[in-house]
């Protein structure tokens, strides 16, 4: 299961959605979200391989050691990014009625060698009409 790209590390596809599927993400906003994600990922030994976004959600393909507490990592990211983004982008407070920025639930799945290219293409095409895509190389 997922033991594919980097020795014994597992590969995951993560999708995080804005509360109420609020249309908030812009290129500048996404860059800020990813700077926070990269910092927290580094602290957890996570290697980001690919990211993309739509106006109400983000996709991240990443690698982590098998024993990594992914729920703790995602919850930490959601909490910290929510606080930072609301502080730097006051428009968020007017668009979301409650304290939370992210939906509590998220999608995460392991990938295997056969699925990786399909998932990479899927993530890449999320913004075909509005191109913004970062590939950190594998």
Image (cartoon, rainbow, N blue to C red):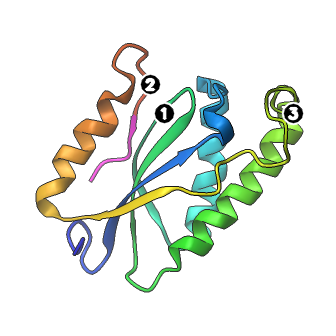
Q: Is residue 67 magenta?
A: no
Say the numbered circle drawn on residue 53: 1
Residue at 53% across, 37% down: 57
Report the magenta residues as a range.
Answer: 134-138
Nearer-the-camera pick, 118 or 31: 118
For the residues labelled 1 and 3, the Cα–Cα distance comes to 21 Å
- Magenta segment's dominant SS is loop
Checking the image for residue 67, the label placed there is none
- Quarter occupied by residue 97: top right
Q: Is residue 61 above or below residue 51?
A: below
Instruction: Where is residue 125? Give x, y as percent.
Output: 30, 28
Question: For mark 2, what is the residue?
Answer: 132
Q: Position of residue 65 (x, y in %)?
A: 40, 79
Is residue 135 magenta-colored?
Answer: yes
Circle 3 residue: 93
- Which percent across, then down, holds residue 41? 56, 63
């Amino acid at each position: 299961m997922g033991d594919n790209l980097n020795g014994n590390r597992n590969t995951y596809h993560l999708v995080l959605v804005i509360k109420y599927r609020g249309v908030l993400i812009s290129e500048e906003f996404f860059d800020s979200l990813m700077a926070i994600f990269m910092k927290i990922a580094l602290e957890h030994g996570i290697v980001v391989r690919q990211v993309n976004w739509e106006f109400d959600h983000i996709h991240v393909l990443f690698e982590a050691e098998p024993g990594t507490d992914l729920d703790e990592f995602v919850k930490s990211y959601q909490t910290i990014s929510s606080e930072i983004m609301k502080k730097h982008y006051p428009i968020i407070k007017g668009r979301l009625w409650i304290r939370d920025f992210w939906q509590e639930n998220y999608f995460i799945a392991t990938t295997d060698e056969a699925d990786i290219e399909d998932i990479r293409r899927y993530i890449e095409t999320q913004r075909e009409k509005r191109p913004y895509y970062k590939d950190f190389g594998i």
